[in-house]
Image (cartoon, rainbow, N blue to C red):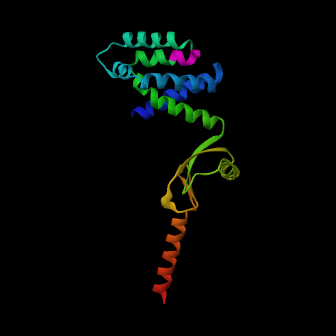
Amino acid sequence: MTSRAAAARYARALFDVALVEADVEKVQSELQQFAEVVSSSTALTSVFGNPAIPAAKKRAVIEAILQRLGPLSRPLEKLLALLAERDRLMLLPDLATAYRERVLEHQRVIRGDVTTAAPLASETLRHIEEGLARATGRRVILDTRVDPSIIGGAITRIGSTVYDGSVTTQLQKMKQALIAEGHSE
C-alpha cells in the first residue's frame, strides 16, 4: 500500500471518530499545526523516519511535543500515539492533506484553481466562484495563479474538469477552423 493510500485510510478513520467525538474542523486545525511542527523540523523528520529508533522513543517524542503544544482533541492524540506505535509518523503530511480533503467534502466544498493573464479583483473571483457553485451545486474555493502567456480570459480547473476560456485557446481554435476550411476548398 502506498503512503498516500495509508494516509487516506488513517484520515478516514480519524474523520469518522472526530465526527462523533469531536469538532472535525478543530481536529483539522490541530492536525495541520502538528504536521507543520514535524515537517519544519529536520530533527523530528529524521527521528520519525529512522526505523532504527524504537517506537517507544518516538511515542515519547510525540508526548513531549504535545506537552509544548498543549492538549489536542482526544481522537487526534490517540491517532498520533497509534502512528508512533506502528512507526507510521512519516504519514503526517499526507494524512493532514487527506483529512483536509475529507472535511471539505463533508462541508460540500470543492477546491480548484483559476489562471488568468493578470491578477483578479476579489469581486471578480467571487463572481467566478459563485458561478461555479451554481454549476456544481457545491461551495467553490479557488486558488488564483497568474500566467501572462494565456493573453487574456481564464482557465479554471475543478478536479479533472477544465474550463478553458483563455484567449490563447480561442486563437488556437480559430486557427484550426481556418486551416480546416482552407483544406475543404
Does the image show residue 159?
no
Rendered residue at 41%/15% (across/down): 85
Residue 150, x across and y down, in percent: 51, 61
Q: How many marks?
A: 0
Report the side of 57 relative to 165 (left or right): left
Out of 61 and 88, give the one closest to the viewer: 61
Q: Main secondary structure of the magenta part?
A: helix
Q: Which stretch is magenta?
A: 72-78
Is 77 included in the stretch rendered in magenta? Answer: yes
When asked about the image quadrant of residue 64, the answer is top left
Q: Is residue 176 above or below residue 116?
A: below
Out of 88 and 155, give the one closest to the viewer: 155
Rendered residue at 28%/16% (across/down): 52
Does the image show residue 156?
yes
Q: Is residue 99 above or below residue 177?
A: above
Residue 105, x across and y down, in percent: 61, 37
Out of 168 and 176, give the one closest to the viewer: 168
Q: Residue furthest bottom?
A: 185
Q: Residue furthest left?
A: 52
Residue 173, x across and y down, in percent: 52, 71
Rendered residue at 67%/45% (across/down): 138
Q: Is residue 78 above or below residue 169?
A: above
